[in-house]
Image: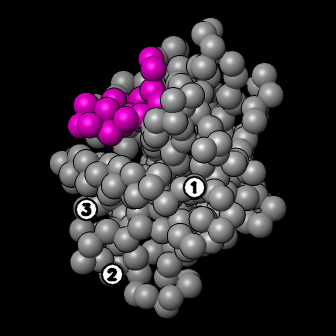
Amino acid sequence: METTWPFVYNFPMSYEGKAKIMKDGPKEGTLVMLFKDDVTAGNGKKKAVIKGKGKINKAITLKLLKLLHDNGVPTHLIEDIDDRSILVKRLKIFPLEVVVRNIATGSIVRRLGLEKGMVFKRPLFELFFKNDDLHDPMICQEHAFMMDLIYPDDLLIVRNLSMRANEILKQYFDSIGFDLVDIKFEFGVDENEEIYLADEISPDTMRLWEKGTMTSFDKDVFREDKGDLLTTYTEVAKRMGLKIEGI
Ligand code: ATP
Ligand code: TYD
Protein backbone atom coordinates (compact mmCIF):
# COMPACT_ATOMS: atom_id res chain seq x y z
CA MET A 1 0.00 0.00 0.00
CA GLU A 2 1.29 3.47 -0.87
CA THR A 3 1.91 5.57 2.23
CA THR A 4 0.22 8.96 2.35
CA TRP A 5 2.41 11.60 3.94
CA PRO A 6 0.41 14.79 3.97
CA PHE A 7 2.74 16.64 6.31
CA VAL A 8 6.12 15.26 5.39
CA TYR A 9 9.01 17.65 5.14
CA ASN A 10 10.20 17.49 1.56
CA PHE A 11 13.52 19.18 2.00
CA PRO A 12 14.78 21.51 -0.65
CA MET A 13 18.55 21.23 -1.24
CA SER A 14 19.06 22.97 2.07
CA TYR A 15 16.67 23.55 4.98
CA GLU A 16 17.39 25.95 7.80
CA GLY A 17 15.47 25.22 10.99
CA LYS A 18 15.54 26.96 14.34
CA ALA A 19 18.51 25.00 15.70
CA LYS A 20 20.04 23.19 12.73
CA ILE A 21 20.78 23.36 9.03
CA MET A 22 20.07 20.22 6.99
CA LYS A 23 21.91 19.94 3.65
CA ASP A 24 22.26 17.21 1.07
CA GLY A 25 25.12 14.89 1.97
CA PRO A 26 27.81 13.54 -0.35
CA LYS A 27 25.82 10.40 -1.22
CA GLU A 28 22.17 10.09 -2.20
CA GLY A 29 19.99 9.42 0.79
CA THR A 30 22.27 11.28 3.20
CA LEU A 31 22.03 14.64 4.95
CA VAL A 32 24.54 16.81 6.72
CA MET A 33 23.08 17.98 10.03
CA LEU A 34 24.79 21.20 11.14
CA PHE A 35 24.20 22.45 14.68
CA LYS A 36 23.71 26.22 14.97
CA ASP A 37 24.42 28.39 18.02
CA ASP A 38 20.83 29.65 18.01
CA VAL A 39 18.55 28.82 20.89
CA THR A 40 14.79 29.38 20.84
CA ALA A 41 11.92 28.78 23.25
CA GLY A 42 8.16 29.22 23.17
CA ASN A 43 7.90 28.23 19.49
CA GLY A 44 10.56 30.76 18.48
CA LYS A 45 9.22 33.69 20.53
CA LYS A 46 12.32 33.84 22.75
CA LYS A 47 15.61 33.75 20.85
CA ALA A 48 19.34 34.08 21.44
CA VAL A 49 22.65 33.13 19.92
CA ILE A 50 24.94 31.36 22.38
CA LYS A 51 28.40 31.01 20.89
CA GLY A 52 29.62 27.44 21.28
CA LYS A 53 26.21 25.83 21.88
CA GLY A 54 26.19 24.21 18.43
CA LYS A 55 29.52 22.44 19.03
CA ILE A 56 28.40 21.17 22.44
CA ASN A 57 25.05 19.86 21.23
CA LYS A 58 26.72 18.21 18.26
CA ALA A 59 29.19 16.38 20.52
CA ILE A 60 26.46 15.34 22.97
CA THR A 61 24.16 14.16 20.17
CA LEU A 62 26.94 12.13 18.54
CA LYS A 63 27.79 10.35 21.78
CA LEU A 64 24.15 9.62 22.66
CA LEU A 65 23.22 8.39 19.18
CA LYS A 66 26.23 6.02 19.34
CA LEU A 67 25.17 4.83 22.80
CA LEU A 68 21.65 4.08 21.54
CA HIS A 69 22.97 2.33 18.42
CA ASP A 70 25.30 0.17 20.56
CA ASN A 71 22.29 -0.81 22.66
CA GLY A 72 20.10 -1.89 19.76
CA VAL A 73 18.17 1.28 18.89
CA PRO A 74 18.42 2.01 15.15
CA THR A 75 19.39 5.65 14.63
CA HIS A 76 19.96 7.90 11.62
CA LEU A 77 23.64 8.44 12.48
CA ILE A 78 26.10 7.51 9.71
CA GLU A 79 29.31 9.23 10.80
CA ASP A 80 30.99 12.19 12.41
CA ILE A 81 31.96 15.04 10.04
CA ASP A 82 33.45 17.94 12.00
CA ASP A 83 33.00 19.89 15.23
CA ARG A 84 29.56 21.15 14.16
CA SER A 85 28.18 18.49 11.83
CA ILE A 86 27.26 14.85 11.56
CA LEU A 87 26.20 12.80 8.54
CA VAL A 88 22.78 11.15 8.85
CA LYS A 89 20.40 9.05 6.79
CA ARG A 90 17.84 11.18 5.00
CA LEU A 91 14.45 10.09 6.35
CA LYS A 92 10.79 10.86 5.86
CA ILE A 93 10.09 12.19 9.34
CA PHE A 94 6.78 11.30 10.99
CA PRO A 95 5.27 14.70 11.85
CA LEU A 96 5.24 13.76 15.51
CA GLU A 97 7.22 14.89 18.52
CA VAL A 98 7.30 11.89 20.82
CA VAL A 99 7.79 12.79 24.47
CA VAL A 100 8.70 10.28 27.18
CA ARG A 101 8.43 11.50 30.75
CA ASN A 102 9.93 10.01 33.91
CA ILE A 103 9.22 12.93 36.24
CA ALA A 104 6.45 15.56 36.03
CA THR A 105 7.33 19.08 34.94
CA GLY A 106 6.63 21.45 32.04
CA SER A 107 3.47 21.13 29.99
CA ILE A 108 2.07 18.09 31.85
CA VAL A 109 2.15 20.03 35.11
CA ARG A 110 0.41 23.00 33.48
CA ARG A 111 -2.15 20.78 31.73
CA LEU A 112 -3.02 18.28 34.48
CA GLY A 113 -2.11 20.22 37.61
CA LEU A 114 0.33 17.52 38.76
CA GLU A 115 2.94 18.35 41.35
CA LYS A 116 6.29 19.27 39.78
CA GLY A 117 8.79 16.53 40.64
CA MET A 118 6.25 13.69 40.91
CA VAL A 119 8.03 10.51 39.81
CA PHE A 120 5.90 8.39 37.49
CA LYS A 121 5.47 4.69 38.32
CA ARG A 122 6.33 3.93 34.71
CA PRO A 123 7.49 6.19 31.87
CA LEU A 124 4.73 8.12 30.19
CA PHE A 125 4.51 8.18 26.38
CA GLU A 126 2.95 11.26 24.74
CA LEU A 127 2.45 12.47 21.17
CA PHE A 128 2.58 16.03 19.87
CA PHE A 129 1.66 17.04 16.32
CA LYS A 130 4.76 18.63 14.72
CA ASN A 131 3.17 21.78 13.36
CA ASP A 132 4.64 25.22 14.12
CA ASP A 133 1.46 27.10 13.05
CA LEU A 134 -0.55 25.17 15.64
CA HIS A 135 2.29 25.32 18.23
CA ASP A 136 2.86 21.55 18.27
CA PRO A 137 -0.40 20.56 20.04
CA MET A 138 -0.59 17.39 22.09
CA ILE A 139 -2.63 14.71 20.31
CA CYS A 140 -3.82 11.18 21.05
CA GLN A 141 -3.10 8.11 18.93
CA GLU A 142 -6.51 8.27 17.24
CA HIS A 143 -5.76 11.81 16.05
CA ALA A 144 -2.46 10.62 14.59
CA PHE A 145 -4.20 7.79 12.72
CA MET A 146 -7.08 10.03 11.56
CA MET A 147 -4.60 12.50 10.03
CA ASP A 148 -2.47 9.68 8.53
CA LEU A 149 0.56 10.92 10.45
CA ILE A 150 1.64 7.33 11.17
CA TYR A 151 0.29 3.78 10.77
CA PRO A 152 -0.76 1.92 13.93
CA ASP A 153 1.91 -0.77 13.38
CA ASP A 154 4.60 1.88 13.00
CA LEU A 155 3.42 3.69 16.12
CA LEU A 156 3.84 0.45 18.09
CA ILE A 157 7.44 0.25 16.89
CA VAL A 158 8.02 3.95 17.67
CA ARG A 159 6.59 3.43 21.17
CA ASN A 160 8.83 0.43 21.87
CA LEU A 161 11.93 2.20 20.54
CA SER A 162 11.12 5.34 22.56
CA MET A 163 10.70 3.36 25.78
CA ARG A 164 13.94 1.47 25.14
CA ALA A 165 15.84 4.66 24.29
CA ASN A 166 14.48 6.36 27.42
CA GLU A 167 15.60 3.43 29.59
CA ILE A 168 19.13 3.43 28.13
CA LEU A 169 19.52 7.20 28.48
CA LYS A 170 17.98 7.26 31.96
CA GLN A 171 20.53 4.69 33.18
CA TYR A 172 23.37 6.51 31.46
CA PHE A 173 22.51 9.91 32.93
CA ASP A 174 21.98 8.37 36.35
CA SER A 175 25.56 7.07 36.15
CA ILE A 176 26.88 10.63 35.65
CA GLY A 177 24.74 12.26 38.33
CA PHE A 178 21.61 13.43 36.49
CA ASP A 179 17.94 12.46 36.58
CA LEU A 180 16.50 12.23 33.06
CA VAL A 181 13.21 14.04 33.61
CA ASP A 182 11.74 13.96 30.10
CA ILE A 183 12.90 13.70 26.51
CA LYS A 184 11.65 14.37 22.99
CA PHE A 185 12.28 11.94 20.14
CA GLU A 186 11.61 12.10 16.42
CA PHE A 187 11.45 9.12 14.10
CA GLY A 188 11.38 8.63 10.36
CA VAL A 189 11.54 5.97 7.66
CA ASP A 190 14.16 5.37 4.96
CA GLU A 191 13.50 4.27 1.39
CA ASN A 192 12.86 0.69 2.63
CA GLU A 193 10.27 1.92 5.14
CA GLU A 194 12.60 0.96 8.01
CA ILE A 195 12.13 3.08 11.12
CA TYR A 196 15.04 5.02 12.65
CA LEU A 197 15.42 7.42 15.54
CA ALA A 198 16.24 10.84 14.03
CA ASP A 199 17.11 14.41 14.96
CA GLU A 200 19.31 15.57 17.84
CA ILE A 201 19.46 14.33 21.42
CA SER A 202 20.78 17.13 23.59
CA PRO A 203 19.91 19.34 26.57
CA ASP A 204 17.78 21.31 24.07
CA THR A 205 15.47 18.31 23.66
CA MET A 206 15.43 16.76 27.13
CA ARG A 207 15.33 17.82 30.75
CA LEU A 208 18.14 16.85 33.12
CA TRP A 209 18.08 17.57 36.83
CA GLU A 210 21.00 17.23 39.20
CA LYS A 211 20.32 13.82 40.77
CA GLY A 212 17.78 14.01 43.58
CA THR A 213 17.17 17.76 43.11
CA MET A 214 15.20 19.95 40.70
CA THR A 215 18.23 21.90 39.49
CA SER A 216 18.07 22.19 35.71
CA PHE A 217 20.92 21.27 33.38
CA ASP A 218 18.98 21.82 30.15
CA LYS A 219 17.13 24.41 28.05
CA ASP A 220 14.91 25.37 31.02
CA VAL A 221 17.92 27.48 32.13
CA PHE A 222 17.22 29.60 29.03
CA ARG A 223 13.40 29.24 29.03
CA GLU A 224 13.20 30.45 32.63
CA ASP A 225 16.29 32.72 32.77
CA LYS A 226 17.88 30.55 35.45
CA GLY A 227 21.55 31.10 34.56
CA ASP A 228 24.16 30.80 31.87
CA LEU A 229 23.25 28.21 29.23
CA LEU A 230 26.79 27.67 27.94
CA THR A 231 28.13 26.94 31.44
CA THR A 232 25.24 24.55 32.02
CA TYR A 233 25.70 22.62 28.75
CA THR A 234 29.49 22.60 29.25
CA GLU A 235 28.98 20.84 32.60
CA VAL A 236 26.76 18.21 30.96
CA ALA A 237 29.41 17.63 28.26
CA LYS A 238 32.16 17.46 30.90
CA ARG A 239 30.31 14.81 32.93
CA MET A 240 29.83 12.88 29.67
CA GLY A 241 33.62 12.86 29.26
CA LEU A 242 33.52 15.07 26.16
CA LYS A 243 36.36 17.43 25.34
CA ILE A 244 35.19 20.25 23.10
CA GLU A 245 37.85 22.52 21.65
CA GLY A 246 37.34 26.26 21.77
CA ILE A 247 34.72 26.19 24.53
P1 ATP B 1 11.22 21.63 15.08
O1 ATP B 1 12.02 21.81 16.34
O2 ATP B 1 9.76 21.85 15.25
O3 ATP B 1 11.56 20.34 14.37
P2 ATP B 1 12.83 23.16 13.24
O4 ATP B 1 12.52 22.67 11.85
O5 ATP B 1 13.11 24.59 13.39
O6 ATP B 1 11.63 22.84 14.17
P3 ATP B 1 15.55 22.13 13.58
O7 ATP B 1 15.97 21.18 14.65
O8 ATP B 1 16.27 23.40 13.44
O9 ATP B 1 13.99 22.24 13.85
O10 ATP B 1 15.64 21.44 12.15
C1 ATP B 1 15.94 20.14 11.94
C2 ATP B 1 14.86 19.51 11.07
O11 ATP B 1 15.40 18.32 10.50
C3 ATP B 1 13.64 19.07 11.88
O12 ATP B 1 12.48 19.45 11.18
C4 ATP B 1 13.76 17.54 11.95
O13 ATP B 1 12.51 16.91 11.95
C5 ATP B 1 14.49 17.23 10.68
N1 ATP B 1 15.30 16.00 10.70
C6 ATP B 1 16.04 15.51 11.72
N2 ATP B 1 16.67 14.38 11.37
C7 ATP B 1 16.33 14.13 10.07
C8 ATP B 1 16.63 13.10 9.14
N3 ATP B 1 17.46 12.09 9.46
N4 ATP B 1 16.08 13.16 7.89
C9 ATP B 1 15.24 14.18 7.58
N5 ATP B 1 14.92 15.17 8.40
C10 ATP B 1 15.44 15.17 9.64
P1 TYD C 1 6.94 19.75 27.45
O1 TYD C 1 6.94 19.70 28.94
O2 TYD C 1 5.78 19.14 26.76
O3 TYD C 1 7.05 21.23 26.92
P2 TYD C 1 7.29 22.66 27.54
O4 TYD C 1 8.67 23.00 27.07
O5 TYD C 1 6.22 23.47 26.89
O6 TYD C 1 7.18 22.62 29.02
O7 TYD C 1 8.28 19.10 26.89
C1 TYD C 1 8.72 17.84 27.31
C2 TYD C 1 10.13 17.62 26.87
O8 TYD C 1 10.21 17.44 25.47
C3 TYD C 1 11.09 18.75 27.19
O9 TYD C 1 12.35 18.19 27.53
C4 TYD C 1 11.21 19.53 25.90
C5 TYD C 1 10.99 18.46 24.86
N1 TYD C 1 10.29 18.90 23.64
C6 TYD C 1 11.03 19.38 22.57
O10 TYD C 1 12.28 19.42 22.62
N2 TYD C 1 10.36 19.78 21.44
C7 TYD C 1 9.01 19.71 21.34
O11 TYD C 1 8.45 20.09 20.28
C8 TYD C 1 8.26 19.20 22.45
C9 TYD C 1 6.76 19.11 22.39
C10 TYD C 1 8.95 18.81 23.59
Q: Is residue 128 above or below residue 189?
A: below
Tell me, yes or no, whether the two marked residues, 3 and 2, touch with CB atoms within 8 Å. Answer: no
Residue at the extreme left of the image, as rendered? 175
- Residue 21 highlighted magenta (yes or no): no
Q: Is residue 227 above or below residue 146?
A: above
Q: Is residue 66 left or right of residue 234?
A: left
In the rendered structure, find residue 150 and report the number of the disc placed on it: 1
Which residues fall within the magenta stretch?
59-79
Determine whether the residue tagged by mark 2 lies in a helix, strand or loop. Answer: loop
Q: Inspect the image, locate mark 1, and give the three-letter code of the amino acid beneath it.
A: Ile
Q: Residues within 10 Å of mark 2 (few under 14, many from 20)?
A: few
Q: Position of residue 61 (x, y in %)?
A: 44, 35
Rounded to the nearest angstrom, the CA distance separating label 1 from label 2 is 31 Å
In primary-sequence order, the first of circles 3 and 2 is: 2
Q: Inspect the image, locate mark 2, and give the three-letter code of the amino acid beneath it.
A: Met
Q: Which residue is mark 2?
A: 118
Q: Is residue 76 above or below residue 39?
A: above
Q: Position of residue 46 (x, y in %)?
A: 74, 58
Mark nearer the viewer, 3 or 2: 2
In percent of the image, x 60 and y 49: which residue is there?
94
Position of the N terminus, as image quadrant, is top right
